């Protein structure tokens, strides 16, 4: 099998796609790879496809070149196409046809549920982030402030600024290398991770206010209707961090945020504090993720969604002997 580096050398046109509702690790890894390829091969065509880039990530290099649609009626054909941070092929969303059309495909990811859908697969479930997997693949001598900034951003977003249990010694060692390239880390952490718009805070407040406990207080659930989101003029990216705030409720094993995205369509985000495997629950509904952070789309009424998801959580809590009854 040709190595990833040989494939890069031979490709004249390279495409990069991340997952739908791109988060920090997704945007960071896509723009890191784009920057790296453009620096190493200035004459190659390198395009990045993402559904959107959140305002707070627009300071990253090449963010203004990101394509949010496929140009023209003829789909561009890439010699090499990278799927980054995407646990499933359909997570690529609008860029999936480009993956199918490409001469050769590479899948770089850290989702435990990733089955390895490309010609070349680098899947490291033990890695904190796709940025971590990517940094281990790339030649270090091309590191500079811009490249290090992209990689660092992805790491802090997927580790919750190095506090989630996916943070390892290796993660910290890589981060140490990155900050030595003068990454403005305090600013990046404040402005991309902690800072919220007024609107985001309002929605967060509403979700917390309307949350309720089930399963003997071991599970907290909140639900946001489409009409509420429309009222605030908010999009799903404005819900980032809400489920993480629910998770830190004292006594809770699992936090669930349900977001109505269409008639009888609900996006479910789950977080686990200890032993419940939420990726196993997400998988039951065609979703995926990590043991402690996973998501899926569930069809049905909100009552169906709550009942169905919590039954799976209850089963696991019972197996773990966490429930009294
Ligand atoms: P979040 O709850 O923040 O949307 O996602 C948590 C984790 O689960 C992320 O790593 C995300 O990529 C993954 N995830 C969320 N929704 C889905 C989904 O519908 N399918 C798959 N395969 N993974 C998902
Ligand atoms: Mn990730």
Image (spheres, rainbow, N blue to C red):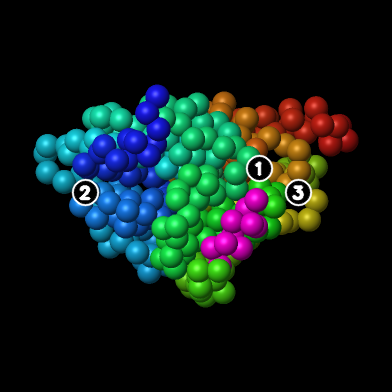
Would you call the spot at circle 2 few (<14 residues within 10 Å), some (14-19), or many (20 or more)? Answer: some
Lower sequence index among marks 2 and 3: 2
Query: Does mark 2's beta carbon lie closer than 8 Å to ligand 2?
Result: no
Q: Which mark is residue 252?
A: 3
Secondary structure beneath dot 2 equals strand
Instruction: Specify whether residue 305 is painted magenta.
Output: no
Vertical placement of 83 versus 150: above or below? above
Residue found 62% across the figure and 30% down from its top? 280
Majority secondary structure of magenta residues = helix
**Which is in the foreground here, disc 2 or disc 3?**
2
Secondary structure beneath dot 3 equals loop
The percent position of residue 252, horizontal first and vertical second, equals 76, 49
The percent position of residue 230, horizontal first and vertical second, equals 39, 57
In the image, 170 versus 66, the foreground residue is 170
Magenta highlight range: 170-179
**Which is in the foreground here, disc 1 or disc 2?**
2
Residue found 59% across the figure and 37% down from its top? 125
Instruction: Specify whether residue 173 is painted magenta.
Output: yes
Secondary structure beneath dot 1 equals loop
Q: Quadrant of residue 278?
A: top right
Q: Which mark is residue 45?
A: 2
- Calculate the distance from the C-alpha at mark 1 to the C-alpha at mark 3: 13 Å
Lower sequence index among marks 1 and 3: 3
């Amino acid at each position: 099998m040709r190595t990833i580096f040989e494939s890069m050398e031979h490709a004249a046109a390279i495409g990069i796609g991340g997952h739908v509702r791109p988060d920090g690790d997704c945007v960071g890894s896509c723009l890191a790879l784009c920057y790296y390829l453009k620096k190493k091969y200035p004459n190659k065509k390198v395009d990045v496809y993402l559904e959107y880039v959140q305002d707070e990530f627009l300071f990253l290099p090449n963010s203004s070149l990101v394509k949010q649609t496929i140009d023209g009626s003829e789909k561009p054909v890439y010699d090499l196409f990278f799927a980054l941070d995407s646990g499933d092929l359909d997570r690529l969303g609008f860029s999936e046809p480009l993956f199918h059309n490409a001469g050769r495909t590479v899948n770089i990811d850290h989702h435990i549920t990733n089955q390895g859908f490309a010609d070349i697969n680098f899947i490291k479930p033990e890695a904190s982030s796709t940025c971590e997997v990517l940094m281990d693949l790339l030649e270090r001598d091309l590191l500079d402030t811009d490249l290090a900034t992209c990689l660092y951003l992805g790491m802090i977003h997927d580790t919750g600024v190095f506090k989630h249990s996916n943070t390892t010694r290796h993660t910290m060692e890589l981060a140490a290398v990155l900050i030595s390239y003068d990454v403005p880390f305090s600013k990046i952490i404040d402005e991309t991770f902690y800072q919220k718009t007024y609107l985001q805070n309002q929605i967060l407040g509403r979700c917390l206010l309307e949350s309720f406990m089930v399963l003997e207080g071991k599970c907290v659930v909140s639900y946001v209707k489409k009409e509420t989101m429309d009222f605030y003029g908010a999009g799903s990216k404005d819900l980032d961090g809400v489920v993480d705030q629910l998770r830190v409720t004292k006594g809770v094993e699992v936090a669930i945020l349900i977001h109505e995205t269409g008639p009888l369509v609900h996006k479910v985000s789950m977080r686990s504090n200890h032993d419940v495997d939420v990726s196993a629950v997400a998988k039951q509904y065609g979703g995926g993720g990590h043991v402690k952070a996973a998501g899926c789309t569930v069809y049905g009424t909100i009552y169906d969604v709550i009942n169905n998801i919590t039954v799976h959580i209850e089963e696991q809590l019972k197996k773990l002997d966490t429930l009294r009854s």
